Structure formats: structure tokens, C-alpha cells
Image (cartoon, grey):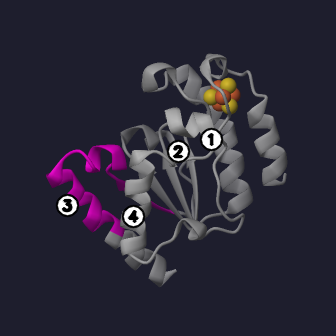
Amino acid sequence: MALEELNNQIYVCRKCRLWQGAKHGVPGEGPINAKVMLVGQNPGAEEDETGRPFVGRAGKFLTKVLAENGITRDDVFITNIVKHVSPKNRKPFSDEVAACLPYLQMQISVIKPKIIVLLGASAKDTPRLEGIEYLEVIHPSAAMRFKNMEDTFTVQIAELAKIISKN
Ligand code: SF4
């Protein structure tokens, strides 16, 4: 299945309650042959407005740290565990994650990334598949708020850059 067709399914999806409070589905974006996929928890308010992933403050911070390590947004596919914003940006419920995970599974099978970066604890539900290297990092929204977490996050993204250079 092409990514565009998958995106169209996400835009009209009603498989869980989250679409009810959303303006836009946010499937994710990036090249179809991206070597690296980044997975976060859920779209926030700015992502819901624009239909694009990681464009708010945390997204800009993530983009900056990636760029400092020679990784541009054009190099990576960025998405979330669930594709619609949640009320007051709460953590998605387990039934919402379960309903939405097949989209992430399909994105992984189409894009076939070599590396998947899990942004924060909620991304740990991402399917683990053989042949893919997984890297767990702090969520950028936490990293931008606390200096010690920012330092750790910076080291983790530098590690990602090293892994990319070996692939
Ligand atoms: S969050 Fe996922 S499962 Fe729920 S309505 Fe949106 S696309 Fe469908």
C-alpha cells in the first residue's frame, strides 16, 4: 500500500474516540525510503492545526538537535503512536493505542526503516521487528524543560547520528 493511500485512511479513521476532538489526522511525514523513523506519543495542538507532526515547540527543539548532529527532517520519517490529538494532550488510552497501532505497523512495512527512534515512554508500544535497530530516547518536550534531560537527549541524538553513519 502506498503511503498516500494509508494517509487517506487515517484522515477518515473512526476506529477510536480521538478523531472526535481533532481538526486533522496527522499520519506523519518524511521520505518513503527513510532509513530512520522517529515515533512519538500523539500529535499536539499545533500538529492538529497543521496536520503535520512535530511542528510545535517540542518539534522545533527536536529539529534543532537533529540538525546539530547533521540529521535533517528530510532524512527521517516522523510519526506518532496515535494519529489524532488527544483531549488536553493526555496520554492515549491503551484501547486507542491498540486501535491505531496497525497504521504504524503498515508505515513500518512500507518504509522499511533500519532504525526506529522511540521518543519517550509512550512510544515503547511500537512494534519490535527483527532487522530493525531500536533506540529509546527522552521525549523532546521533557528534554527542552529540564537541563539534565536536555544533556541526556543531546547525547542520545549524537548516538543516533553514529548509528546512522554505520548503516
Ligand atoms: S487515533 Fe488512530 S485509531 Fe483513533 S481515530 Fe485516529 S487514526 Fe483512527
3D distance between C-alphas at marks 4 and 1: 20 Å
For mark 3, give the secondary structure: helix
3D distance between C-alphas at marks 4 and 2: 24 Å
For mark 1, give the secondary structure: helix
Residue 126: which disc? Answer: 2
Residue 151: which disc? Answer: 3
Q: Is tag 4's residue or tag 3's residue first in the polypeptide sequence? A: 4
3D distance between C-alphas at marks 4 and 3: 14 Å
User: Would you say the residues marked 3 and 1 are in contact, meaning their CB atoms lie under 8 Å apart?
Assistant: no
3D distance between C-alphas at marks 3 and 1: 30 Å
Is 55 located above or below residue 14 in the figure?
below
Residue 91 point in image, percent of width and height: 43, 26
In this picture, residue 41 sits left or right of residue 97: left
Amino acid type, label 4? Lys
Residue 64: which disc? Answer: 4
3D distance between C-alphas at marks 1 and 2: 24 Å
In this picture, residue 143 sits left or right of residue 49: left
For mark 2, give the secondary structure: loop
Residue 50: which disc? Answer: 1
